[in-house]
Image (tube, helix red, strand yellow):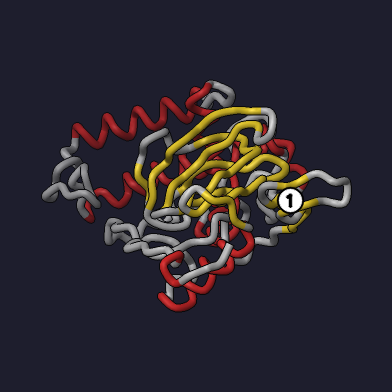
């Protein structure tokens, strides 16, 4: 196919590579086109075990399904481009939902099969990725991550010293954690659930909710007065996520010694050691 200027992708939300992070190492295992065994690969294959897959631009999810070629797959349309993510573990966005650059779409399996069509015609996904990268450079959106409004609060937690490592783990496993909680594959410990109930009951009794004018960024109307409550919730949620990693994936914070790891395998994770 001859590439023209009109094939450039327009996106108000910016651009993003389809993988978890621009620094993530992604190994190409099969190229597009005819293979040595005589078969034809209609996309590219990448070694990308449990990567968070993101929307590359403004778009809409146009298909989710399963077949012999792709396994579980998800297709998103960006302008005239149709991008299919094949061999995924979980689809995080439903059919018909609109997405922006950086929106989480799905979680990859051991291998990601990526196919791209432009106006119905199949193209080499590598050329599409090159175009995306060029758009990111030109627009200055190299991270490809949309900006989100957040509460202007400094909420300290017991995990602040290890937050960079925790955020890296969340980028990789948090969507899967939510899916397993929703599906009952991972059960939040009774103690954690009861603690959250107590916190919210106490917050309601002390009128922490709607203390300020609610907004899209702050739907409960929380104010600076609720920082201690927010910190307690943060501690519980982070602790439960680390508990999930320990029980389901045998993954621990680097600061934890062997005794702490054994303890984490039997009960919710304690705060990291200083």
Q: What residue is disc 1 on? A: 47
Q: Is residue 158 left or right of residue 114?
A: left
Q: Quadrant of residue 110?
A: top right
User: Is residue 239 visible in this depiction of the protein?
Assistant: no
User: How many tags in the picture?
Assistant: 1
Residue 145 in percent (x, y) is at: 44, 61
Q: Quadrant of the C terminus?
A: bottom right
Q: Quadrant of the N terminus?
A: bottom right
Q: Is residue 56 left or right of residue 211?
A: right
Residue 144 in percent (x, y) is at: 46, 64
User: Is residue 195 visible in this depiction of the protein?
Assistant: yes
In the image, residue 161 sits, relative to residue 219, either above or below, namely: below
In-front residue for pair 255/120: 120
Q: Is residue 235 left or right of residue 97?
A: right
In the image, residue 2 sits, relative to residue 210, either above or below, namely: below
Mark 1 neighbour class, 10 Å CA radius: few under 14, some 14 to 19, many 20 or more: some
Residue at the image point whose x is 71% and y is 54% from the top: 32
In-front residue for pair 241/50: 50
Q: Quadrant of residue 255?
A: bottom right
Residue 9 in percent (x, y) is at: 42, 63
Residue at the image point whose x is 74% and y is 58% from the top: 27
Q: Residue furthest right?
A: 37
Q: Residue furthest front?
A: 2
Residue at the image point whose x is 70% and y is 55% from the top: 254
Q: Residue furthest left?
A: 213
Residue 142 in percent (x, y) is at: 49, 71
SS at mark 1? strand
């Amino acid at each position: 196919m001859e590439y023209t200027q009109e094939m450039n992708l327009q996106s108000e939300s910016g651009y993003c590579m389809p993988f978890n992070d621009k620094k993530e190492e992604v190994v190409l295992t099969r190229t597009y086109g005819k293979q040595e065994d005589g078969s034809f690969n209609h996309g590219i294959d990448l070694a990308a075990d449990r990567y968070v897959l993101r929307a590359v631009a403004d778009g809409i999810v146009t298909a989710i399904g399963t077949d012999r070629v792709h396994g579980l797959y998800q297709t998103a349309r960006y302008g005239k481009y149709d991008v299919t993510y094949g061999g995924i573990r979980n689809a995080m966005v439903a059919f018909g939902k609109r997405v922006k650059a950086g929106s989480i779409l799905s979680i990859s399996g051991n291998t990601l099969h990526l196919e791209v069509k432009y106006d119905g015609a199949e193209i080499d996904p590598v050329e599409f990725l090159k175009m995306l990268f060029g758009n990111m450079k030109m627009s200055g959106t190299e991270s490809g991550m949309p900006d989100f409004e957040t509460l202007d609060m400094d909420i300290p937690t017991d995990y602040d010293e290890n937050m960079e490592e925790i955020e890296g783990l969340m980028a990789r496993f948090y969507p899967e954690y939510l899916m397993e909680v929703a599906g009952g594959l991972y059960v939040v410990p009774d103690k954690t659930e009861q603690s959250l109930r107590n916190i919210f009951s106490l917050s309601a009794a002390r009128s922490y909710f709607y203390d300020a004018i609610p907004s899209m960024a702050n739907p409960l109307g929380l104010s600076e007065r609720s920082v201690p409550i927010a910190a307690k919730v943060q501690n519980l949620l982070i602790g439960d996520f680390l508990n999930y990693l320990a029980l389901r994936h045998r993954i621990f914070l680097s600061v934890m010694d062997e005794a702490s790891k054994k303890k984490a395998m039997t009960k919710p994770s304690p705060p990291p050691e200083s």
